Image (cartoon, rainbow, N blue to C red):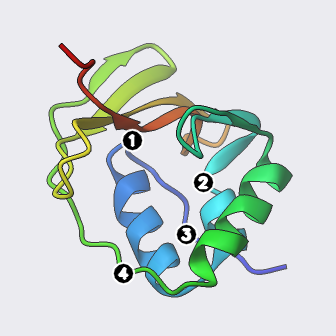
Amino acid sequence: MTEYEKAMRPEDITRLFVERSNAGDAAGVAELYEQDAVLAYPPGSQTVGREAIRELWAKVLANRPRFEPEEPLPTLISGDLALTSTPPRDGAGARAQVVRRQPDGSWLRLLDQPEFTLPAR
């Protein structure tokens, strides 16, 4: 099994996501999530669990999309939970993740909302 760099700060996850996605590494992307994580993607649905997230990213990355780093907004931390977010370059509204500190001090995504869009008025 590949030994992946761990996110030692909540903000590291976004950087690692971009690096692994651009390398076409769906398994590496999935390793950024807890075993029972919930990803709100594709839009309007949920993908639950690390293995399902890996399968989803394998399909997405097969098209070789290119991700650009996004500057993170300030992280909110309460104990072993943190809220990370970025204002997306693609105009998706916002991205937000709840991450949890692991026993070894690293962080993994628990909840991932990659796209928020404003409600129609």
Could you tell me how many numbered marks the image carries? Answer: 4
Return the mark for residue 5. Answer: 3
Measure how far apart labels 3 and 2 are at the Cα level.
Answer: 10 Å
Instruction: Please state the horizontal and vertical placement of residue 57, each as a whole percent of the image.
Output: 65, 65
Which residue matches tag 1? 10
Measure how far apart labels 1 and 3 are at the Cα level.
Answer: 13 Å
Instruction: Please state the horizontal and vertical placement of residue 30, each as a whole percent of the image.
Output: 68, 59
| Amino acid type shown at disc 3 | Glu
Q: Is residue 93 left or right of residue 50?
A: left
Which residue matches tag 2? 32
Circle nearer the viewer, 3 or 2: 2
Circle nearer the viewer, 1 or 4: 4
Instruction: Please state the horizontal and vertical placement of residue 80, each as a whole percent of the image.
Output: 51, 20
> Which badge, 4 or 3, comes first in the chain's sequence?
3
Q: Are marks 1 and 4 in contact (CB under 8 Å)?
A: no
| Amino acid type shown at disc 2 | Leu
